[in-house]
Every structure is written in C-alpha cells, then in structure tokens.
Image (tube, rainbow, N blue to C red):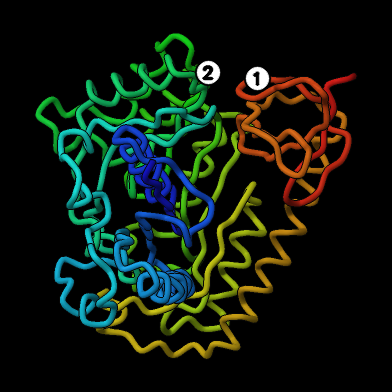
Amino acid sequence: MPNYYIWTIGCQMNKAESERLASLFEETGYQAIADVKQADIIVLNTCVVRQNAEDRAVHKLQNFKPLKKARPGMIIAVTGCWVESNTDRLKADFPFVDYFFKAGECPPWMDKDKWSQALPEKPQPATYVPIIHGCNNFCAYCVVPYRRGREKSRSMADIVCEVKELSSRGTKEVTLLGQNVDSYGHDLPEKPDLADLLTELNAIDGLCRIRFLTNHPKDMSRRLIETVARLDKVCKNITLPAQAGSNEILTAMRRGYTIENYKKLVSEIRSVIPNVGLVSDIIVGFPSETEAQFQQTVDLLTELRFDAVHLAAYSPRPGTIAAREMADDVPEDEKKRRLKMLESLQEKILTEINADLKGKIVEILVEGKQKGKWFGRTGTDKLVFFTDNVNYTGKLVNLRIDQTSPWSLQGTTKY
C-alpha cells in the first residue's frame, strides 16, 4: 500500500488543511507513515508569518533533497504561505520538488471536488473547521493577504453540513477558523454573520463545544459578544489581538483602531461575558518602536491581564507594506530584550490568574494522552492534565484543580 508523510508548521488554518489532505490520501488508498525516508509522497505545509517559521521550513525541505536523490520516484510537494503565485524562484532554488501549490488550494494531482468536500476520516474530539479564507486588511507587517488572497466565506449551509457530519463521526468540539472571523459572511448573498453561524451550529445534536478565532478589534460586534454569552455550546474564550499598546505603532501597523477603542471593547466583553478567557497577540520591535512606546505595551498587559498572550518579535516579510516602506530599525538584541521582558511579565500574571483556580471544579473535553497523562481544555482554554486508568478520550470530565502553574493545571477526578 502506498504511503504519505505530512509536515506542518504555522497557524490552525494550516493544520486544518493538512487534516483534509490526510483524509484525501486515506480515501485514495494511502496510509500515513512516521518514517519520512520510506514515504512515497511527502508534503510540507509551510508558514512565513515569522522568519523563524520560514527558516524551519527551508531547513526541513533541504533535508529531503538526499531522500529524493536516493529514491527518484518519491514525490515531494510544498504548500502553505511560503508558496507565492509565481513559483519560478522556488522551482529554481529547489529543483528536486515536484509540486508547489498555494495555501488552501487543491493539490495538483487530486480531484478538486473531492478536495472541497474532504473531511477527516477519523476526526479528533476537537477539530478545526475553516469558515472564511484570505484577508482584506493588509496590516503593514502581515504577508497573509498576499499569499492567501482576499476574503472568501464558505456558505453557512456547507459549514453546518460539515459540522453535522463531523459530529456524527465523533467530534465533540469545533474551532471555526479565519484570518478574521468577524468578516464572515459579508461577501455572501444572504449576508449572514458569525453570530448567525454560531446560532445554527449551537443546535447540532452531539456537538458539545464551539470555538472561533481570530477576531479583529475593529470588526467585532456587540451582537457577536451577546451571542457568545447567550449560546450554551459556545466557549467563553475570545482571541483578540492587540499587537501593540501604542497608538502611533498601531497606526503604523495599519490596524484600524486606537488603544482606547481596544480597551473599551475588552471592557464590553468582560461585562457581557463574566469570567471570559481573553487571549491577545503582541509584536515587539515593530519599525520605529521607541522604549516609551514599548512601555505602553507593558502597561497594556499589566492592566488587562490576559489569560494568554502570543508574543513575537517583528521580522520583515517580503512584499508587505512594512518591508517596502519602513526600516527595520530596532536592533535584534533590543527585540529579544523586550520579548523576554513581556514573557516574564505574562508568566507572573498567569501564575496569579491560574492560582485562583486551585481547589475549583472545572470541566474539560479530553483530547488524548501526553506522557501517560490525559489532557484537555476548559471552556476558557486552560490546559489541564490528570491521571486515571479509564479511557476518557472525547469525554467531558469534571476535575478538581490540585496544582497550578502559568502554562497548565493538574487535576483529579476523585474529589
């Protein structure tokens, strides 16, 4: 039986697309293999949002060159945001690669209709479901609109049908994906929005939880916030990237809101959805960011106390507005210092937030095992581990939290 190997890096959208690719391989008689040296088809699903991700993808691909030389019949394909519309440069630099195809597109050797309808044959308890592809925002630092194109929503009927099918196969939780989920539906004839979609999905039998990401602060509506509060299956967990605490930097980033707008939105969310888990993204060292402007980001994290913050140092992305028009003038050592400072601050904040959960009873959806322990996440996206001899995969379990740390919790079913 022929086999395949898929390597994935980057966002949840990449992971969702890799799941669907794996499903198509299985459907056509291929089986997954752990030893890449024995694979008949290798697919790299790449990311270029940060330089580090691109470097890892290039390094991984170079490792496959001798495999291709030893086994010329092996097929190597590359997809993801590293692949531009014009692949001439990539073909010249990596002549041993058989196929390059853009993120989200059907692989050249597969049927397009089957690709659009592909679902994981053996879905995990928690599964990703893309609802809108591409992005119209063109933030100064971001390469995504250039690689994934403009926003294109899937029809609500298709999404509902897919989630029903996933639920019938055992999926208990879906995470709706989009570069900006708040734009969902604006390009469809009926003009549904994310609140409409959440309401439809909330009624699906067998489905226990619904999540969605990522939101854009300039587009998130009061109606959506109230819908999240009202629907019992929608997790009270919202990802709302701030990116910076300085209005000058936000303007340079072309984010479309002020920090005052952002704080007002956070206050509104917390007033309508008590105990909501809030997640943010921050970029340090954006071009021209001064120490005073960075301090405003420190102040923002100190004041708002997020449940998680995804931190990154700015790296120029070819083709973006920032790369074309702005000098990368914050020294690398300074970027690292600022990043480390925020990491330490966020660790302190999370230590305090999570300590308040000790002794509390929480509900998690068990996703599987890691190093002999069951793991799952609360509705607010806290990672929890516990030990038990019973098979809990895919089940909702109540646990008492006995130990806390900044990054995860330890619980027990016996309380």
Q: Which residue is mark 1?
A: 396
Depicted 152 relative to depicted 399: above or below:
below
Which residue type does callout 1 highlight? Leu
Residue drawn at x 66%, y 51% as measured from the top left: 305
Depicted 225 relative to depicted 48: above or below:
above
Foreground of the two, 259 or 96: 96
Which residue type does callout 2 highlight? Cys
Is any part of residue 395 visible from this angle? yes
Badge 2: few (under 14), some or many (20 or more) residues near its Cα, within 10 Å?
many
Counting from the top left corner in percent of width and height, residue 361 is at 79, 24
Query: Does the CB distance between marks 2 and 1 fall below 8 Å?
Result: yes
Residue drawn at x 72%, y 50% as measured from the top left: 407
Q: Which corner quadrant of the image does residue 26 belong to?
A: top left
Depicted 278 relative to depicted 386: above or below:
below
Q: Which corner quadrant of the image does residue 278 belong to?
A: top right
Foreground of the two, 181 or 94: 94
Depicted 255 relative to depicted 221: above or below:
below
Counting from the top left corner in percent of width and height, residue 243 is at 47, 62
Counting from the top left corner in percent of width and height, residue 308 is at 62, 50
Foreground of the two, 89 or 335: 89
Is any part of residue 215 visible from this angle? no
Whole-number angstrom distance, CA of label 2 to CA of label 1: 9 Å
Earlier in the chain: of badge 2 and badge 1, it is: 2
Residue drawn at x 79%, y 24% as measured from the top left: 399
Badge 1: few (under 14), some or many (20 or more) residues near its Cα, within 10 Å?
some
Q: State the SS at label 2.
A: loop
Q: Is residue 110 left or right of residue 159?
A: left
Question: What is the quadrant of the C terminus in the image?
Answer: top right
Q: Which residue is mark 2?
A: 208
Question: What is the quadrant of the N terminus in the image?
Answer: top left
